[in-house]
Image (cartoon, rainbow, N blue to C red):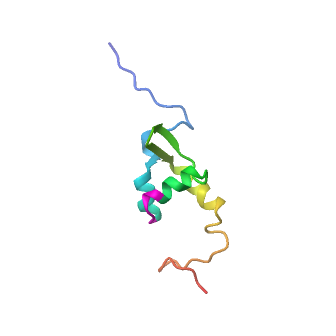
Amino acid sequence: MTTQSIHPPPGTWNARNLLTVLEVAEWARVHPKTVYRWIRDGKLEAIQFGPRTFRVPEDAIGKFLNKNGYGKSADVHKSTGREQS
């Protein structure tokens, strides 16, 4: 009997590119309730696995940032991460 590894087709989700709400909150340095609010308000794409279980695709973070204007007009200082005046 030969076992065959099954790879998902390109463009489908797998566990490596789905983030938990807590991971997104830690990355964005916000409270997890803020991430849930972004999801509820439709600002951040998420996949719901259960009544209280969400996963956020990695590429949704970039879409969220672009949609909300981050990185477009602000000149962020690389060493401090703060906007320059």
- 31 magenta-colored: yes
- 56 magenta-colored: no
Give coordinates of residue 82: x percent, y percent.
52, 79
Residue at far left of view: 1
Q: Is residue 77 above or below residue 35?
A: below
Q: Is residue 75 above or below residue 33?
A: below
Q: Is residue 14 above or below residue 78?
A: above
Residue in view at x 50 percent, y 38 percent:
13
Residue in view at x 61 percent, y 69 percent:
71
20 vs 35, nearest the viewer:
35
Give coordinates of residue 68: x percent, y percent.
64, 63
Give coordinates of residue 10: x percent, y percent.
55, 36
Quarter of the image with the C terminus in it:
bottom right
Residue at far top of view: 1
39 vs 77, nearest the viewer:
39
Residue in view at x 39 percent, y 22 percent:
4
Q: Is residue 69 above or below residue 40?
A: below
Provide the residue span drawn in magenta: 29-33
Question: How many numbered markers are drawn?
Answer: 0
Side of 21 relative to 46 (left or right) = left
Residue at far bottom of view: 85
**Chief secondary structure of the magenta span?**
loop
Residue in view at x 43 percent, y 43 percent:
52
27 vs 32, nearest the viewer:
32
Which of the 4 quarters of the picture holds residue 32? bottom left
Quarter of the image with the N terminus in it:
top left
